[in-house]
Amino acid sequence: MNNNSIKVQFAEEEHTKYAEQICQMIYESALQRGTGIAKRTPEYVSMKITGGKAVVAIKGDELVGFSYIECWGHGDYVATSGLIVRPEYRHMGLAAQIKAKTFELARLRFPFAKIFSITTSLPVMKINSRLGYKPVTFSELTDDDEFWRGCEGCCNYDILQRNNRRMCLCTGMLYDPKQPLKRQSFLSPYLMMLKNYFRKIFHLK
């Protein structure tokens, strides 16, 4: 199976028909992983879609993936959340495509905001790292109470409470647009070869 026929796009109003299905997919994924995840309602998901804050992956008329963004702290922070891919479409690179599209949406809608994610998923952490996110403590994320109330539906919420919101089973990751990722130049390997060459010629340490 390939993903050539799957379209990853910004969600539109017509995609609200998938809201209940999205919530069920998120719930089932949490059960399979045995980890906590905040519950979403179809109304909540629909609001993200109609508000221009969601991304969907569609194959024909079938929903195969989803994610959304949320603004916090008066626009200073944007969270990416709810990343999900149908089990039969996993291991095809779709999660990375959806995450990248969600990141693109966040940068378009809120270009000066810090973008963050809290997750228990190692694959999501790897994707975040490639996009320029860095692991951070919860104290570096938004202090907006409304955001943290969204964790109340998680089975690990008591852990978050006991630690006064300082830590939980999730890992916090942050992208700061003021500190962009330093990308390695394609010339770097050749420059290193030249450097080593001249070191050898001139007996440099």
Image: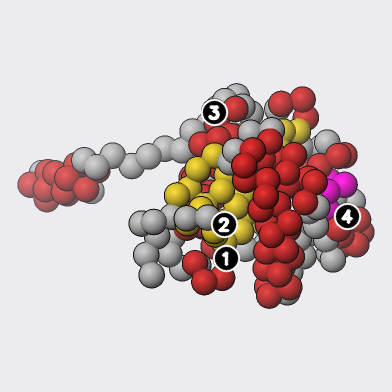
Label 1 belongs to which residue? 86
Label 2 belongs to which residue? 63
Please rate how many residues cluster around mark 1, counting C-alpha atoms within 10 Å: few if below 14, some from 14 to 19, many from 20: some
Please rate how many residues cluster around mark 3, counting C-alpha atoms within 10 Å: few if below 14, some from 14 to 19, many from 20: few
Between the residue at mark 2 and the residue at mark 1, the CA separation in whole angstroms equals 8 Å
Q: Nearer the viewer, residue 90 or 6?
A: 6
Mark found first going from the N terminus, 2 or 4: 2
Between the residue at mark 2 and the residue at mark 3, the CA separation in whole angstroms equals 24 Å
Residue 103: tell me if it is visible.
Answer: no
Label 3 belongs to which residue? 108
Residue located at (76% from left, 33% from top)? 72
Q: Which of 183 and 190 is in front in this view?
A: 183
Give the structural element (helix, strand or loop) at label 4. Answer: helix
Q: Disc 2 residue type?
A: Leu
Residue 107: tell me if it is visible.
Answer: yes
Mark found first going from the N terminus, 2 or 1: 2
Mark found first going from the N terminus, 3 or 4: 3
Using the image, determine if residue 29 lies above or below residue 205: below
Residue located at (80% from left, 57% from top)? 39
Label 4 belongs to which residue? 152
Q: Nearer the viewer, residue 75 or 188?
A: 75
Tell me which secondary structure the magenta stretch mostly adopts.
Answer: helix
Q: Nearer the viewer, residue 203 or 51?
A: 51
Q: Is residue 151 magenta?
A: yes
